[in-house]
Image (tube, helix red, strand yellow):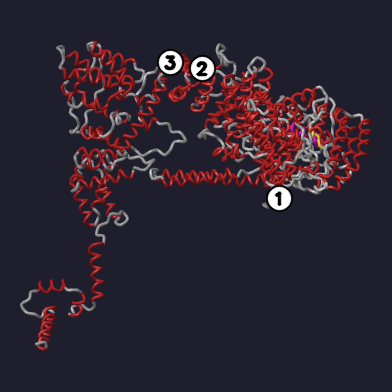
Amino acid sequence: AFLGTKPIVVCWKHRYYRLGQGEVENVSEDTYAILKERLDPETLESLGLIKQAHQFNQKIVKIKTKLFYKQQKFNLLREENEGYAKLITELGQDLSGNITSHVVLESIKSLIGCFNLDPNRVLDIILEVYECRSDQDEFFLPLIKSYMCEPLTLCHILGFKFKFNQEPNEETPTSLYHIAAALLHHNLIELEDLYVHLMPLDASIVEEHKREITEAKQIARKLTMVVVPSEKMEDKEREKEKEEEKNDKPPDNQKLGLLEALLRIGDWHHAQSIMDQMPAFYATSHKAIALALCQLLHLTVEPLYRRAGVPKGAKGCVMRPLRNKRAPRPAESFEDLRRDVFSMLCYLGPHLSHDPILFAKIVRLGKGFMKEVQAPPSDTLLSCFLSIADQVLLPSLSLMECNACMSEELWGLFKLFPYQHRYRLYGQWKNETYTITLLQNVKPSGRQIGKLSHSNPTILFDYILSQIQWYDNLIGPVVDSLKYLTSLNYDVMAYCIIEALANPEKEKMKHDDTTISSWLQSLASLCGAVFRKYPIELAGLLQYVTNTLKAGKSFDLLILKEVVQKMAGIEITDEMTSEQMEAMTGGEQLKAEGGYFGQIRNTKKSSQRLKDALLDHELALPLCLLMAQQRNGVVFLEGGEKHLKLVGKLYDQCHDTLVQFGGFLASNLSTEDYIKRVPSIDILCNQFHTPHDAAFFLSRPMYGHQILSKYDELKKAEKGNRQQQKVHKYVAACELVMSPVHEAVVSLHPPRVWDDLRPQFYATFWSLTMYDLAVPHNAYDREVKKLQVQVKAIEENPDVPMNKKKKEKERCTALQDKLQEEEKKQLEHVQRVLHRLKLEKDNWLLAKSTKNETITKFLQLCLFPRCIFSAIDAVYCARFVELVHQQKAPNFCTLLCYDRVFSDIIYTVASCTENESRRYGRFLCCMLETVTRWHSDRAVYEKECGNYPGFLTIFRATGFDGGNKADQLDYENFRHVVHKWHYKLTKASVHCLETGEYTHIRNILIVLTKILPCYPKVLNLGQALECRVHKICLEEKEKRPDLYALAMGYSGQLKGRKVHMVPENEFHHKEQPVRSTTTASQLNGPGTTAKPATNASKTEEGACEDADRSKDKSQGAAKPVNKANSTAAKVTTSNGNGAPNSTKAIKERDDKEKSGKEKKEKKEKTPGSTPETKGESRREKQRDERGAAGKEERAPREGKEKTPKADRDKQKAEEKSSKEDNKAKAGNGEPKELSRERDTGAKESKSKEKGGDQSKEKGGDRSSVSGSLKSPVPRSESAESERDHKRRKLSPCFFPFRRSVPNCCVFHRPSRSPRRVLIHTGKPRLASPS
């Protein structure tokens, strides 16, 4: 059976092939076609119907692609430009003939068939042409209705057109609104379908409305005292000020645009539907919408008004009705008003004020209704008219401009109502209408002020100014409300302001005589705001300020300060952060970005107006000179009768205004204008009697301009691109410009000044700025990073439109490029300046007298006057001292300069004003920063000070700053010196705090607050300060609250810094000192114990004492600054070693007996001997006794051997137990020994003022009076007495001052007594250092 099936299978396969090839009978052709269609290509290939299945598959794909995917119609103009061109020609032809929409439609169909045009694209072109010919509604509307088969397609095309205009700064054309409204009106599209394509969203509209209401409420609160009627809010798009800082204009509100178009064609039904989607009165608050609705109302009430409302004799203007048959039907009777008119009026609300004519028509219709219906009117119509009066007429009258006619017209209607109805209307008007309906319309009240000012400007402005003087919160709203004044009104406004300022009946001081009156401050703020915002002539105000300065009065400088700050964006403040201060040392772009608290932008126009006013009336230089002179006038002319606190404020105000005004002139005047108006420095000082600091402040920009101009000329004359050539040209330009200045400054001071300071050095110091010394790379990097962060934030913000993102990114990128370019430019400039200084430094200081005298003149004539001039100058002074040190300028002793700055600050602090104290504190802080950096790291000290002439301790012949390492101050001794400076600052601070004087306490607290980052660093000094400040807090809490606030603020900050303080032994290496009563000889220098050469030189020093003293007396008149810094410090010689070796100690012991008698004989013969020198023999004798007693102790301490650790631990334990005992005994919290030391210092001060120096003989501490730096006995020979050891343990702030001073560097500040011991005269001493 299995074998029998094979023929059957072959048979069926043969029949299948025959069927596929169509050879089977009784099978139709359709069946064969279906069979071939269903079979797969491989089967067809096996049947021989196709050649290859692969080629067949490829052919099928091509056929399907052509059939389903190949474009049969063209929707781009470039694909079939001929067809679309003919289409546009057909639609744009003249339609005045017999051309109908049916004929054109047939042509359009032919074009579509002939050129395979896309029907949707054709519809789009029809709409485009209709938009261009929007007056042909009768033609295009039937054409679109005949052409279009699907309304949704037409709606989508319109939606795309609206979407295209939704970008910022894009404006939707009115013609598009018109065709959309026409299509809606003729029901070709549905409003619901089109509404979703319009922007903004309803939620955004609601949010905008809420924001406007909130802002209006705030303005309303500020304007409660301004008695002016309110006015309707104008259209925001037209009334909004187009200021320079304005952001991108937002997209059009397409819903409002469509609403206006609907109202224009009379489609009230659809317009009402759109208005229902928005907040109440939001749509009609836009003027265009309100006017369109008013126009529709005019047309609706026209027939009834002509019949019942026109007064006798009035003609009026006949209104042409709309051609639109679907518009609201005109009202023929009063009953017809209920159909649409009342509804329209309710939607219009208070914005009927835009159309006074319609307002009058409605009122007259109401009067006609009341007169026509003699019998009691129907309740329905009467209630409708009452509602219209409540919701429309009265609010509109409030917003209407001062139109007395409308008020009278409304009264004609109201007098026909019973008084009950009238009073109810008035109550609604007063209590509800203003708070609910009109809140958003308070801002344009400026229009009313403008209206009132047209007829009575002086009365109005006088009242406004009187209100502002009492309520300074009105300044902002009033300034905004003055935008509608005329030019004459603005001029009258300026006159009224000046008249109010010059009112002799008003006191410019408050009753306490310590502060400026608030009315003057309010008027000054108003001046700054008004003159910046409006184009008012400034000449009168500037001349008024000039005249008051001429009269010796400085109160009105507050006005000039406000005007310059608001108009030029230049603010003056000493409360800058470190980052802001760093930014102020850069270029103008960096200052603008990171230097000011508030970036006042868009001041270009206002600053130009201020500059023009100053130049046209020649007031720039007179104002500067008068302000510079008035600073002293405040103290010596005005200050006699005024409170000291007020005098300080007036001085600071005058000085700050001078700095602000000078900065404005420097940044806004051109080089030619500035040089033309600012005279040379000698004329400023000698002829105009300008103080030197102010004169150089005014001249400094001129020097910079001249140097750059000359530098550019030299570069153009000699072409060379090498950096070295540029530097040489810059130096040459500086010499050409500054040479006349060097000659001019010679006349500013007596000839003896120039024996030590060269005029070149003096001019260089006063002509440079921080911009010339260093580049604030950190500030530039910080601002660039800020801009990069802004760019990143803009990119990640999805709410910002793309074009706004692009603009902001471009702005930030441009600022980055400007900052980087400015940084590069400043870097090149600083390099040129430093090269110039390097070439000049050898000729800066001559030091013909002494280095001490050189430092005195430098401090007196350069450093102190400038460090309190401005905050940036304070930083400059500190950095300039460091720069002179780094340049290794000959004859400049850095140590002596720092010592003079830190030693006696009492007089300087006491003579400063409040703002000067801040600047002086900033200066001390910068100086302390440098010292702290050197103190903190030995490597830094060795690198920056180790081999520098400023740290020499032995001064030889003038001009010799040799490199003997033994002559340099080593690191450990420098730490002693820094500790001594900290102690001096503490002592001066405690003295100021204990004086009880207001100025002393206030100024020292300000200074201490400024230097807090760098001082105090030692724990016991910080405890002493904390104790005194706490006492101030207790004493001044009730008496002087401002001092209490300062003290509390500093006390809190000081406690926060306590964790950074260190014990004294960590601050510097502390050794056991000798008894304080046996160091009289060391006061004159440690060399007496280790260097016999020093003893030999004492005779010469004593002989020169009288000559130096007479010289100091002759120069006393020329040193006013020394009053604040005591007298000149003197320098002693030393070998520079902190611990002498045992060989020197043995040699010293052998020479004791011989040198003792010789020294006594020499001192008796020396004409300059004093009580100090007489007492020296006794101290030498005591030292001899100690030397004999300590021989065994010194023997094992050869070289620099230190105390064993076991002894140190034992000593620390004893000190700790003593401190605990002292705490238990303390009664009032103040260490007894500190009080004892203070009392001792006071007694010594009195004795020194009388001329006696007996304190030395008694072992008194001279440092408590004169602030000199004491020298200890070498550490290897020191032995501490038990009494001094206990005193140091008991007192948190007491320490023997001799411990903190190195043997090798001794500075003495002479006492104020007539006779002084001068250890070194500065004359050449050729003795060998050995």
Mark 2 to mark 1 CA distance (whole Å): 61 Å
1298 part of magenta stretch? no
Percent x, y of residue 720: 68, 51
Q: Could you tell me residue 996's position as x and y percent?
A: 66, 21
Classify residue 761 as left or right of residue 56. right
Q: Amino acid at mark 2?
A: Cys
**What is the three-letter code of the residue carrying label 3?**
Ser
- Residue 129 visible in rendering: yes
The reply, left or right, for residue 698 in relation to residue 580 is right
Residues at badges 3 and 2 in contact (C-beta under 8 Å)? Answer: no
Q: Quadrant of residue 871?
A: top right
Residue 650: give x, y in percent of width and height.
62, 22
Residue most extreme to the left? 26
Which residue appears at 10% of the width and 73% of the height?
31
Work out whether residue 1226 or residue 163 is closer to the camera in this orientation and state it. Answer: 1226
Sequence-wise, the earlier of marks 3 and 2 is 3
Foreground residue, 145 or 648? 648
Mark found first going from the N terminus, 2 or 1: 2
Please say whether residue 741 is visible from this viewpoint.
Answer: no
Q: Which residue is mark 2?
A: 496
Q: Which residues are magenta?
A: 850-859
Other residues around mark 3 within 10 Å, as few (<14) / some (14–19) / many (≥20): few
Secondary structure of the residue carrying tag 2 is: helix
Front tag of 1 and 3: 1
**Mark 1 Cα-neighbour bin, 10 Å: few <14, some 14–19, many ≥20:** some
Q: Nearer the viewer, mark 3 or mark 2?
A: 2
Residue at the disc numbered 1:
725
The amino acid beneath tag 1 is: Gln
Q: Which residue is mark 3?
A: 455
